[in-house]
Image (cartoon, rainbow, N blue to C red):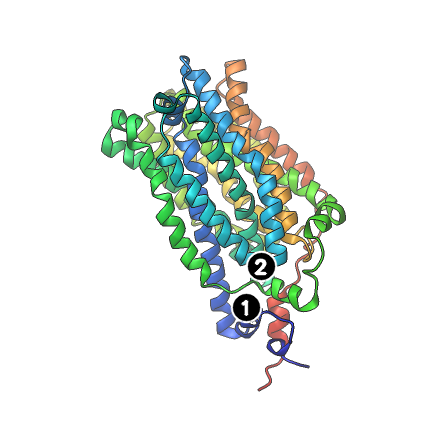
Amino acid sequence: MKRLTETPDLSTEGARISTTDRGPARKRAVWKTAIAGGAGSVIEYYDFSLYANLAIYLSAAFLSRSDPGTALLDTLAVFGSGFLMRPVGALFFGWLGDRHGRRTSLLTSVVLMGLASSAVGILPTYAALGVAAPLLLLVLRLLQGFCAGGEASGASTYIAESAPSRLRGFFGAFNPAGIAIGTATAGGLAAVVSAVVGSEAMSEWGWRVPFLLSLPLSFAVLFLRSRLPESAQFAKNVRTGVAAGSPIRAALVGEWRAVVKLVLLAFSMTCTAYVGHVYLNTYLTAQLYRPAEEALGTNSIITVVFALLMPCAAWVSDRFGRRRIYGAAMVGYIVLAIPAFQWMAPDSGVPLALAMAVSFIPWVFAQAVGYPLFTELFGAKARMTGVAFGFALGTILGGGFGPYVAQLLMTATHWNLAPAAYMAASALVGLIALRFVGPSKIDDVPAEIAAEPERD
């Protein structure tokens, strides 16, 4: 049998993978892949989450509403509009990754996201441009959504195809950990800037600083990812001709059932996360009147600590099964969401950090297990397209408009626990969808290559 590196129709990058998928070299390659994938997610979700963390300042800068509550709702609607472009971005970046390489897709998305986010930092306000200001903000938010459509799913696919099956959950959790750290960094940096410059300066110009940092951070990740090889699965696709044809058609026609399952699972995961994590900062400051520094700082610290535990949580799924652990996380949301939100009230007597830590326990397991689980729903031919598109649709429903629906329910019912009840309902959707998930469809390509004997 010929060595894989001698196969004539394999790309140079694919060949480089095959020679490193053995022994210590293979282990180093998997670690580098997981770390680079997670680092990219840190920056992309730092960029994407800044809007939600700074929504109060953006509503004052770009909207002319006299009613602050209505202006905040409008700002959250623009936040949600970014998710409308996710399916478009998912199809584009998924097609790019399935036809031209996972790495190519990830490099393109991180650069465009950095440019869009930094542009928000120099955008003139409503006072300077009038109605053109919120329109330009909307355009930039749509571009952010387009880029985000391929990032999380692309990084998850890239890592899953590079890791051995017995540790796919462990290494796959580097991606959601990166997402969590990126989200926390957005909130934490906003809190630091607010504390340093003061609330008045923060409203006038301080909110721009976190956005302007996006560009250099994005180019740092671009350098890191450019030094990585392609995934072993894509190398195999090139060698066997699986990459030929239409990935979009293969995903939407050939694997539509997997897409539907992923939409429902992604809805449950992103709704609970965006309402109970990202929107939580706005909820604490605008509804419970907690100081912004306290809300943002506490959220950020707990998020980073819990994110570091995600690989351990995902390792549990490597031992006991991803479906079982993901289901336990959804049950955790149903049981803990409402009590945790009750404890966050200033008059509850419970420290805010403790209440938030309790509410984040299901989040750790859902995020850590969800991303590896999603990649296992699809076959090799259109995996990146299927994961990206299904995740994008679910994220629109759960994450994109989750904060808006939560705020709307609370405004309509005057019930402070409405966001928590909405989280519990979305978790129930995830439990139902989980019943229809079958075994993993990912081949352990690195192990297959490693099993092939060396011949000099």
Q: Residue beneath label 1, please? A: 13
The answer to whether 241 is drawn above or below residue 396 in the figure is below
Tag 2 near tag 1, CB within 8 Å: yes
Is label 1 in a helix, a strand or a loop?
helix
Which quadrant is the C terminus positioned in? bottom right
Between the residue at mark 2 and the residue at mark 1, the CA separation in whole angstroms equals 10 Å
* Number of residues whose C-alpha sits closer than 10 Å to that of mark 2, classed few (under 14), some (14–19) or many (20 or more): many
Query: Could you say which quadrant of the image residue 162 lies in?
Result: bottom right
Q: State the count of labels.
A: 2
Residue 254 image position (x, y, % from top left): 76, 49
Question: Upstream in the sequence, badge 2 or badge 1?
Answer: 1
User: In the image shown, does 127 or 320 lie closer to the viewer?
Assistant: 127
Q: Residue at x 49, y 28 (%)?
A: 78
* Number of residues whose C-alpha sits closer than 10 Å to that of mark 1, classed few (under 14), some (14–19) or many (20 or more): some
Q: Residue beneath label 2, please? A: 101
User: In the image shown, does 257 or 344 lie closer to the viewer?
Assistant: 257
Residue 353 image position (x, y, % from top left): 37, 34
Query: Could you say which quadrant of the image residue 98 lies in?
Result: bottom right
Amino acid of disc 2:
Gly
Q: Which residue is drawn at 61% across and 69% down?
A: 447
Residue 271 in sight: no
Residue 61 image position (x, y, % from top left): 36, 24
Q: Which residue is drawn at 49% across and 33% down?
A: 139
Please indicate whether residue 15 sits to the left or right of residue 309 in the image: right
Instruction: Work out which residue is located at the far right of the displayed protein and give it.
Output: 254
Amino acid of disc 1:
Glu
Is label 2 in a helix, a strand or a loop?
loop
Residue 177 image position (x, y, % from top left): 46, 48
Q: Residue at x 59, y 60 (%)?
A: 161
User: In the image shown, does 443 or 348 lie closer to the viewer?
Assistant: 443
